[in-house]
Image (cartoon, rainbow, N blue to C red):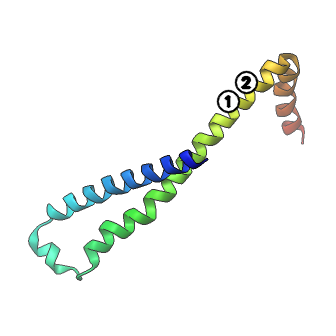
């Protein structure tokens, strides 16, 4: 669990760094008049706050989806290896029960 959390934190930091650098590059490509026309904290807020509020939830969602898919595949392999006949019956029975109800 500890190693997984460390990996997730490293991933979040790397994505945050990459996105902040991209935003900074876009900021430096802006015309000078547009850059000085905004408030003092406008661009720093756009560079750091927007990245910080969008990247971590997106990474958490992706990792949650990935973990769910891994669990689904592992569960299917275990169920099929225990009893493939019972698994086959359940695979056909669940959609039928769902459609009837």
Q: Secondary structure at mark 1?
A: helix
Q: Is residue 92 left or right of residue 73?
A: right
Residue 77 bears which disc, if any?
Answer: 2
Q: Quadrant of residue 38?
A: bottom left
Which residue sits furthest left?
Answer: 32
Above or below, 82 against 35 in this view is above
Residue 57 or residue 101, whichever sits in front: 57
Residue ID at (53%, 47%): 62
Above or below, 71 against 10 in this view is above
Residue ID at (47%, 58%): 56
Percent position (x, y) of residue 72?
Answer: 69, 34
Percent position (x, y) of residue 4?
Answer: 55, 45
Q: Report how far apart the C-alphas of labels 1 and 2 lie in the structure.
A: 6 Å
Percent position (x, y) of residue 43?
Answer: 26, 72
**Which residue has dot 1 on it?**
73
Residue 100 or residue 91, whichever sits in front: 91
Residue ID at (43%, 57%): 55
Q: Secondary structure at mark 2?
A: helix
Above or below, 74 against 15 in this view is above
Q: Is residue 93 left or right of residue 1?
A: right
Q: Do tag 1 and tag 2 residues touch (Cβ < 8 Å)?
A: yes
Q: Quadrant of residue 21?
A: bottom left
Residue ID at (51%, 58%): 57
């Amino acid at each position: 669990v500890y190693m997984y959390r460390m990996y997730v934190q490293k991933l979040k930091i790397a994505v945050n760094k990459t996105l902040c650098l991209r935003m900074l590059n876009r900021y430096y490509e802006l015309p000078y008049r547009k850059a000085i026309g905004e408030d003092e904290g406008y661009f720093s807020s756009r560079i750091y706050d927007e990245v910080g509020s969008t990247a971590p939830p997106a990474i958490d969602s992706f990792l949650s989806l990935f973990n769910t898919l891994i669990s689904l595949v592992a569960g299917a392999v275990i169920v099929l290896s225990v009893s493939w006949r019972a698994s086959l019956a359940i695979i056909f029975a669940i959609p039928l029960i769902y459609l009837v109800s």
